[in-house]
Structure formats: structure tokens, C-alpha cells
Amino acid sequence: MYKISQYSSTFELTKGFFIALLSSCFIYLNHWGFSHPLLNTILGISTLYLLLQEEKKVWFFSGAFIGLFWFWWIALSLQHYGMVWAVPIVISIIMLSYGVLFWLLAWSSQKIPSLLQTSGILLPLLLKASALFILSYIHPFSFDWFKPELMFVESYLGIEKWQYAIILGAIVLSIWKRQLLYLLLMLFAYQSIPSAPFISEDHIRLVTTHTAVNDKWNETLHAAQFENLFKQIDQAIEENKTLVILPESVFPLFLNRSKLLDRLKEKAKHISIVTGGLYWDGRTPRNSTYIFTDNKVSVANKVVLVPFGESNPLPDFLSDWINKIFYDGAVDYVASPNVVDYQIDGKIYRNAICFEATSERLYEGEPKNMIVLSNNGWFIPSIEPTLQKLLLQYYSKKYGTTIYHSVNMSESYVVKNGEIDQ
């Protein structure tokens, strides 16, 4: 009996691993340059088809390995705090969080029919499909990068909620009736794939920088780093660009209290400049965007902070302890209460800094244009820039937003209707 039980558990773990692997392939294929709409379509459908037929143990293992394959890179940031020893602990917490979440959803899907004393597989299937549908709205520790429908962002199927519902409904019918022909209902969720990439405006220069995290905060290197940034601005002026966009916090100091502000104002007489920098109002630090245009300077502060990286989502007593142990007692950044739009050359842009560009909140009002500044140096080398890009494609498709993304430590790009121009 023990051997049979052991074999069963190993088999369930293997199935969970395989399902999680299928769900993650679209990220790694994109990362390695092998992404294809047909392959992504098949992989996404296969993931959901297999998972919907499984019991709670397999859901637990699937969730745990999804947490691993999608988010292992989060632990990389610990190396910059000299805490490599904590990497396996953080990865284990990530796996356990998503494993328990998936288990609870599957357990509920099995428990409810039992309480209602109903038989058959239809109700459990519908409940599991509903669980997969609402997973996009459940965010452990306020981290909202897991969206099951993201698997279809570069596929022949759509990522809108109604399209995702059609996909799940077709799979449920196919399993219930034991007839694969019901999968043809997914044709109603079809989205066309552009035959050629779009070409973005040539009057905007997106700057990519390659400054490692340790070098970024090394004050002895700042002079050389800043001179390189001004060279980038001068080059944009020589190329007759009207706007130059620099990454998040490329000026890792309180720019509003620095002499560099006057130098940037002088450059802004020839070109509009959007750049990242820190802001200090005498009380609280902020991660901000500085906009130099029309002979004036405006500051847009971050609205959605990175969980644990910039703001601790735990209760105050735990938050203070975490900050003391992991961040040398540093205080959290403070978020701005409202999203910020600003105008350059007659065009309105929504401000977004790194993580917040992947948050639904930043797309309130369906902005037509968004400028995003990022620093991916904390997670290099990893799939984090790829997953971030896929999420920006997702939101660009969903809200029709053109996104101009300037990045440190990975390539900058423009996203329009979900398509990338680098």
C-alpha cells in the first residue's frame, strides 16, 4: 500500500510539473526567440485542458511549479543585499503561495458539489473553469503578474475576458461530452495576427542603459554615468528628435535638489526630456518621473509601488521587522494617490514607472499613450524582462494603449496594439 501511495504521489507531482511546464513555455519561447502563434495556441489550450481534468493534489503541484517557472527570478534581487542564502527560502515561499492558492480553488470546486449532493463531472468542471477565470484577480502579496490568459497574448486566441471565457467554456464542453469537436467553439475567440510589425514614430528616442545595480548606487561612478546620459540627449538633439526618454532612476539622487536639474533644463530648450530620478519633499522619498518640456519642469510620482521592493504589503509590525532585517531599516517609498497624465507636443501620455505599468490601475480611462521607465537590473539575467514585455503587450491589446518603454539592463521598445517595435 505504501508503494502504491508513493507511486501515486510521484505521478501527481509529475503531472503537475508537466502542466506547469506547458503553461510557461510561451514565456521561455519568447525569451529565446522561438515564439509562434500556432505553437502558443496549442500550448495554452493543452494547459487548460489537462488542468481542468485534474484533482486538487495535481492543482497544488501545478500551482507550485507555475510559481517557480514564472517567478523564480524574484529571488535574484536578494544577491544585491548580500543575502544569497535567502534565495531558496523566497523561492519556496513563492511555490507554496501559488500551490496553496491552486489547491484551495480545486478543493472548493470539489467540495461544493459534495455539499450540494450532486453527481457528475459538469459542476466540478464549471467550478474549476470559474476558478481559472478569477485567478487573474487574485494577487498574493499584491503581486499581480499571474494572469492565465496571458498564455494567449502571442497566439491566435484573444486575451479579453469574454474570449478567455469562450476558451474555458469550449474545453469544459469538450471534456464533459468527451468530444474534441467542441474545441472548435474557440473560433469565436479568434484574433488576427498582423502580418508585419508596425513602425513607431521616428521623432522619439528611447534610451537603453546598461548600468548594473551596484554601479548605479556607487557615487564614485555617477559623474561618468551622468555624462553618458547627457551624450544620449545630445545625440537625440543631433538626430532632430523632439522627445528623448531615459529609464527609471537613471539619476539615482534627489534630482529636484541637484545642480543637474539646471543642466537638464538647458538641454530641454532643444528637446523634450522624460527621465527617471528620485524626489524629496523634505519628508518622504519618492520614485519619480521628471518631465522637461515647454520651458518648465513637472514631476510625476509613482502610484503603484513594488511589493517588498518599495513598499511592504505586510502589517506594520511585520513590515518594520522585514525592513530592518532585509533593507537595513530603510523606510518605504510613498506612492502618489492618483495616476498622472502629462502633455508633450500636443500628445497626452500616461506616466508609469516599471512595475506599475503592469498594473490594471494604470489603465483607468484607457489612455491612448503611456511612457514607461524601468530598471530591470535587479533581475538580470532572467526571464523578468520577457515576462514584463508580454504583460505590456497584454495591456496594450486590452486597452489600445501605445506604450513607449525605456529600460535599464534590457532592450527598450514600443508596444502598439500588442505588437513590438524595438
Image (cartoon, rainbow, N blue to C red):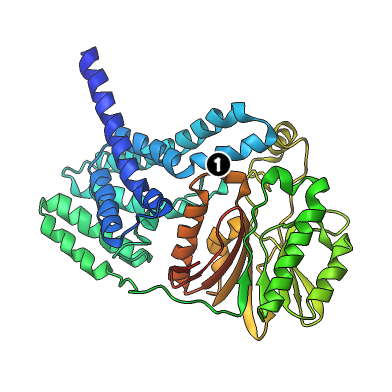
Q: In this view, does 37 lie above or below 204?
A: above
Which is nearer the eye, 159 or 241?
241
Residue 243 lies left or right of residue 23; in this view the side is right
**Amino acid on which disc 1 is placed:** Ile
Residue 1 picture location, percent across and down: 20, 13
Residue drawn at x 37%, y 64% as measured from the top left: 159
Which is nearer the eye, 206 or 416?
206
Q: In this view, does 346 lie above or below 158?
A: below
Instruction: Identify residue for label 1.
Output: 74
Residue 155 picture location, percent across and down: 32, 62
Q: Decide if residue 122 is in sight here.
A: yes
The outermost residue toward the top is 2
Q: Decide if residue 285 is in sight here.
A: no
Residue 120 lies left or right of residue 281; in this view the side is left
Which is nearer the eye, 118 or 415?
415
Hey, which quadrant is residue 359 in on the image?
Answer: bottom right
Residue 315 picture location, percent across and down: 67, 40
Describe the element under mark 1 as helix, strand or loop.
Answer: helix
Hey, which quadrant is residue 274 in on the image?
Answer: bottom right
Residue 27 picture location, percent across and down: 40, 51
Rate crowding at label 1 as few (under 14), some (14 to 19) or many (20 or more) other CA atoms within 10 Å: some
The outermost residue toward the bottom is 346
Q: Is residue 16 above or below residue 5?
A: below
Residue 222 lies left or right of residue 82; in this view the side is right
Residue drawn at x 38%, y 61% as measured from the top left: 153
Which is nearer the eye, 354 or 95?
354
Count of all numbered marks drawn on residues in the image? 1
Residue drawn at x 70%, y 67% as measured from the top left: 232
